[in-house]
Amino acid sequence: MSTAEVTAPLVRRRPPAAVRRRRLLASVAQHSLLIAAGLIFLAPFAFIGLTALMTNDQALSAHVWPRPFVWHNLVQVFHEAPLWRYAWNTTLYATLATIGLVLSSAPPAYALSRMRWRGRNAAFALVLVAMLLPPQVTVVPVYVLWAKLHLVGTLWPLIAPNWLGDAFSIFLLRQFFLTIPEEYLDAARVDGCGEVRILFSVVFRLARPALAAVALFSFLYCFNDFFGPLLYTGENPAHWTLSVGLEQFRTLRQVEWNLTMAATLVVMAPVILVFFLAQKAFVEGITLTGVKG
Amino acid sequence: MTTSAAGAALAPARVAADRRRARRRAAWRRRGLVLLFMSPWIAGFGVFFGYPLVMSAYLSLNHYDLLSAPRWVGLANYRYLFHGDPLVWPAAKNTLWLVAFMVPLQVLFAFGIAQMVARARRGVGVFRTVFYLPALAPPVAATLGFVYILNPATGPVNAALSHLGIEGPLWFNSPTWSKPSLVLLGLWGIGNTMIIFLAAIIDVPKHLYESAELDGAGPLRRLVYVTLPTISPVILFAVVIGVIDAMQYFTQAYVAADIASGSASNAASGANNLGYPEDSTLFYPVLLYQQGFRYFNMGYASAMAMVLLAVALAFVLLIVRHSRRWVHYQGGGK
C-alpha cells in the first residue's frame, strides 16, 4: 500500500505530498476510530464471558479478570435451572413455528406478486398494515381466545398463528418473488406446469436464499421472543422458553451475578454459533429487508 | 342456401360462446387458485387480526376480568384513560421519549458506523461481523448483561469511571439514567440497521462521487449531496422501523426494571417492579401489559390498545400512502 502511494503520484502527477499525508492520516484516524468502536462493541461480550467464569465474590468486586477461572459455572447453571427443558421448549416453538410460517407464507406471497387479480393491491396494503401495527393492539382478545380454548400455559398459542401466514414473511417473500424473471415462469407454464407446481418447484428453487432468510429470521425471532412466551407460558414453568427461564433465573438465585452471566452466555451461544455457520444467509436476508423493502 | 348460411353464421357464434364459457371457467379456476393461495393469510388475518380488532373495540367499552362475563360500562374506560389514570400520561411520555431520542440516535449511530465500515480499506467483513453481532444477542440476555455491566456498585463501567475519578451514575437504578441506559443498550444492538445502511452506501454509484469530486466537493459535501440523497429511502425505512419498534418497546424495559429492582432491594420480584425506578421505564406497552395481564383489567387494556391502534394506524397509513415515493422495486413482474 505504501509503495503504491509513493509511485502513483509520479505517474498520475495529481495529489501533492501534503494531500497524500493528510489522506493517510485521515485513513489511520478512520481505522483507529473503527477499531476503538469495534472493541467497545465487543466489550459487553467480554464482560459477560469473563464474569461467567468468576467466583461470586469476585463478580461483586471490581476485578475484571477471573482468578481462578471457574469453568464449573457453565455446568452449574444447568443444575440451578432446568435449562435443557427450556432449550427443548424453545426448539419446539422455533422449529414448529418456522416450518408453518414458511409453508403458509409462500403461497400468499406468490399470489400477491405473480398472479393478477382484482383486490390484490388492497390485500397487499392490509398485509403491510398487519405487519406494521404493534402486536399489543390485538393481544387482549387473542389472549382471551386462547384462554377460552384452555391453551394458555402451553406453547400452542405461540406456534399456531405461524401456520396461518406471517405478514412480515409474506412481505419479504413477495419482494423477492417480484425479482424472478417472468420468462422462467412462462417456460414452466409452456411445459404444462400449473401454478401450484410452479410455486413449489420453480419458485421455491429460485427463491431459496429468500426462503432461507425468512426461515432464519423466524427461528431467531422465536428464540429471542420474550413477550409471547411470558404471556402464554409465564404461569407454567414446565413450558418456559430460554428467554423466560433466563429472566426468572435471577429470582431463583438472588444476586449471583457470576451464575446469571453464565446462563446469559449459555443462551447467547447458540445464536452466535448459528450466525457464524450461516453468516451469508443472514447478511443477504437483512439486506433484502432494507434495500428492496 | 339460407339454412347453410344460417348454419355458417351459427357455428362461429357457438364457437364464440364456447370460448367465452371456457374463458369464464378458466377465470373462475384462477380465482379459486388465488383464493387457495391466499387462504392461510385470509384465515390468519381474520382470526388473529380482524376479529381481535373488533373484539378489542367491544371489550374497551366493558369491564372484563376474564372470569366473569363482560359488563357494559360505556366510555368509562376511555374517561379513566384520559382523565383519571395517573400512569397513562407518564407511560405515553416515556414512549414518546424513545421516539424522540432513541430512534434518531440509533439511526445516526448506525449510519455513522456503516459509513466508517464502508470506507475501511481492509477488514470490511470483520468489522461488519463485529458491529452486527450484538444485534443477534437475545434481548433478555443482552439486557441482563447490560444491567450487570452498568451495575452502579460493582459493574465494570462504574469501576472504570471511578479509576478516572468520576463517580458513575446509578444507571438502571436512577430515574434520570434508566432511559439513557436503555439507549446505550439500543445503540449496542443497531446491527440490522447498520447492515442495511452499509449495503446502501456500497451501492451508491462510484461515478456520482467522482463527478462531485471533480466539481470540487469535499468529503462533507459529498456526504450531504451524494450519499444522503441516494440512500434516503433506506434512511426513511430505518426511521419507520425504529418508530414502530419504539411503539412496542417492551422486553428490555421489563427485564431491566425487574432485574435492577431485584438487585437494589433484594426483595423477591413481585408484581410492582414494572417501570422501576419510579415509573421511568414504564412505557405504554408495559403499562398495557400490567393492566391487562397482571391486574386482568382487560376492558381497560383494550381501551389502551384502541388508543395505541389510533396512533399507530395514523402513522402506518401515512407511510403506506407515501411508500410509493421511496419503495423501489428492482425486478420486473408487476
Image: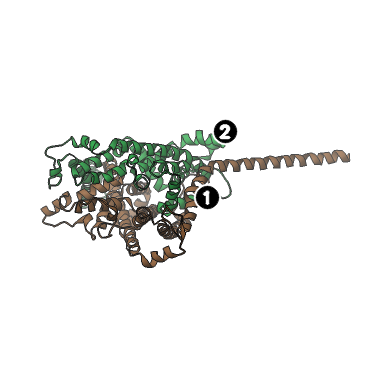
Chain colours: A green, B brown
- The residue tagged 2 is A193
Kindly indicate whether the residues beneath marks 1 and 2 are on one polypeptide chain.
yes
- SS for dot 2: loop
Pinpoint residue A273: horizontal percent, then vertical percent: 29, 36
The amino acid type of the residue labelled 2 equals: Cys
> Which quarter of the figure has residue B27?
top right
Which quarter of the rendering shows the N terminus of chain B? Answer: top right
Q: Residue at x 74, y 42 (%)?
A: B17
CB atoms at circles 1 and 2 under 8 Å apart? no
- On screen, A157 above or below B105? above
Kindly identify which numbered label has been placed on residue A253: none
| Mark 1 chain | A
> Which quarter of the figure has residue A155?
top left
Sequence-first tag of 1 and 2: 1
Q: Is residue A2 left or right of residue B94?
A: left
- The residue tagged 1 is A123
| Mark 2 chain | A
Q: Residue lying at the far top in this picture: please name it.
A: A191
The amino acid type of the residue labelled 1 equals: Ala
| Mark closer to the observer (1, 2) | 1
- The foreground one among A117 and B281 is B281
- SS for dot 1: helix
The CA distance from mark 1 to mark 2 is 26 Å
